[in-house]
Image: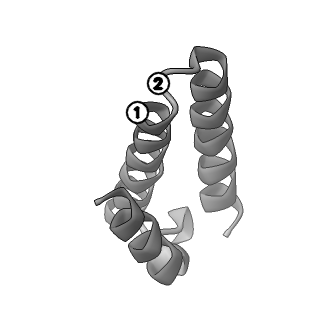
Amino acid sequence: MRITWFAWMAQHVDEFGYSDGPLRASIGTGAVLLTAALLWFMLHRNRPAAVAAAGLTSVLGIAWLAVH
């Protein structure tokens, strides 16, 4: 499931920018946060790595959406 999600995100990453309106922006933000949550759950045994990976994914994903 996780690999499928990451593959789907890689294919559709350019369709969820903030410049495309509020619906697509909210879908894109939700997708970024879901991806961060999946990273957190994948790394849950190493809490510092899980926090760092999820935080970095959230910040970079939302920043990328904001500028594209």
Front residue of 25 and 10:
10
Q: Distance between the residues labelled 2 and 1?
A: 5 Å
The answer to whether marks 2 and 1 mark residues whose Cβ atoms lie closer than 8 Å is: yes
Tell me which residue sits at (49%, 41%) in the image: 39
Instruction: Name the foreground residue: 20 vs 40.
Output: 40
Is 26 rendered above or below residue 33?
below
Helix, strand or loop for disc 1? helix
Where, by quadrant of the figure, is residue 31 drawn? Answer: bottom left
Which of the colour schemes (rainbow, by chain, secondary structure, one colour) is used? one colour
Q: Which of 30 and 20 is in front in this view?
A: 30
Mark 2: amino acid: His
Report whether residue 15 is seen. no
Answer with left or right where residue 28 lies relative to residue 68.
left
Q: Where is residue 6 in the image (x, y as percent from the top left)?
A: 45, 65
Q: Quadrant of residue 59?
A: top right
Which quadrant of the rendered structure holds the C terminus? bottom right
Q: Which amino acid does label 1 sit on?
A: Phe
Q: Is mark 2 on a helix, strand or loop?
A: loop
Report which residue position mark 1 lands on. Answer: 41
Q: Residue at x 34, y 59 (%)?
A: 27
Identify the disc placed on residue 44. 2
Percent of width and height locating residue 4: 35, 69
Image height check: is 53 above or below 51?
below
Of 51 and 45, nearer the camera is 45
